[in-house]
Image (cartoon, rainbow, N blue to C red):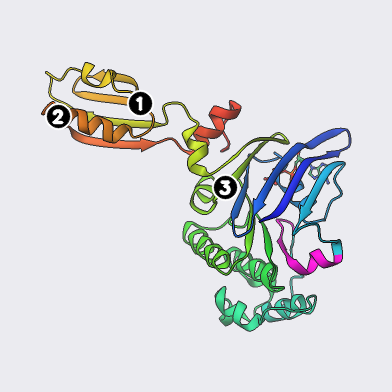
Amino acid sequence: MKVIEVNGLRKKYRDRFVVDDVSFSVEEGEIFGVLGPNGAGKTTTVECIAGLRVPDAGTVKVLGGLHHAELKQRLGVQLQSSAMPAKIKVWEALDLYSSFYRDPADWHALMERVGLTDKRNTPYAKLSGGQKQRLSIALALVGRPKVAILDELTTGLDPQARRDTWELIEQVRADGVTILLVTHFMEEAERLCDRLALIDAGRLVAVDSPAGLIARVQDSQHVTFRAPAAFDTALLTGLPQVGEVRRDGARIEVTGSGELLLAITTALSSAGVVPTDLRAEQATLDDAFLALTGRKIST
Ligand SMILES: Nc1ncnc2c1ncn2[C@@H]1O[C@H](COP(=O)(O)OP(=O)(O)OP(=O)(O)O)[C@@H](O)[C@H]1O
């Protein structure tokens, strides 16, 4: 079942379209990512989905087309810009937000789950970046939403806090919440998302799984190894998975696609060649974005 349907969405600021004819849909239970460089229009897109901005054209349907008041009850939103009053304590924020909903979650349990119970009396301004992020996730979940929109939720976090947050998001999804995640971190998108919409300069570039996007890169596999001097590279050039073979002394470098590593090791083994220093690398989402748009996502 589709829980979000976006069709021909356009939004302009002054006379520039920052979201330009974007269409995609999100299935129930997915972690769906919106990935693109800074300024691509990701936040504007999800703000339109959340009903916080009015599109100039196109349609957005969430949970079958709920109206604003009902949608607010079923949608959890955590936006980049949502800061809290400096003095509000963790428990007060949770208590306040839960009062906005008809059927809120038990915020004590939620506070425990995001690891903030020992910070319950700490004012917002005294929380670390990671604790603020975890509080904002808890606030987005306190209404027991069917869909949660999370914008750049791990920006500014250290690697450990980022991994902890990813784990939390996976648990939330396991509870049946559909998640729309805005990010410009490739690793985050690759690790968490079932499918991704790639956005560049307001336009949708592609929608696919991370693996599907990476598979679009020509010669997405890269294998290197060392072989004896007598080794003839013709053994590899005829393989359908192989794109190019380069030799630099004893070092052989092969680019290609599909099951490249398996094809190479099988061919070597049947010729009795024992490779050493064998390494395989795969293209990344950054390579996919580059192949699709001509520029890199990471800055
Ligand atoms: N209220 C506004 N008025 C005018 N221009 C805006 C407004 N909000 C955003 N923009 C511009 O619209 C473009 C898209 O912004 P948006 O925040 O949607 O991008 P983004 O992909 O989420 O980027 P980031 O990751 O940097 O937040 C940017 O060029 C931004 O400067």
Q: Is-magenta flag for residue 28?
A: no
Q: CA distance from mark 2 to mark 3?
A: 39 Å
Q: CA distance from mark 2 to mark 1?
A: 20 Å
Frontmost residue, 268 versus 123: 268
Q: Secondary structure at mark 3?
A: strand
Quadrant field for ligand 1: top right
Give the quarter of the figure containing the N terminus: bottom right
* Amino acid residing under circle 3: Arg
- Residue labelled with disc 2: 270
* Amino acid residing under circle 2: Ser
Q: Secondary structure at mark 1?
A: strand
- Residue labelled with disc 1: 255
- Residue labelled with disc 3: 195
CB atoms of marks 1 and 3 within 8 Å: no
| Residue extent of the magenta highlight | 69-81
When the figure is inspected, residue 111 is found, relative to residue 140, above or below; the finding is below
The quadrant in which residue 168 appears is bottom right
Q: Nearer the viewer, mark 2 or mark 1?
A: 2
Residue 130, position in %: x, y? 57, 64
Q: Is-magenta flag for residue 79?
A: yes
Which numbered dot is residue 85? none
Residue 284, position in %: x, y? 46, 38
Residue 98, position in %: x, y? 74, 78
Q: Secondary structure at mark 2?
A: helix
- Crowd around label 1: few <14 · some 14–19 · many ≥20 (10 Å): many
Give the quarter of the figure containing the C terminus: top right
Q: Is mark 1 within 8 Å of ligand 1?
A: no
Q: Residue at x 71, y 53 (%)?
A: 4
Which is more N-terminal, label 3 or label 2?
3
Frontmost residue, 160 versus 238: 238
Q: Is mark 2 within 8 Å of ligand 1?
A: no
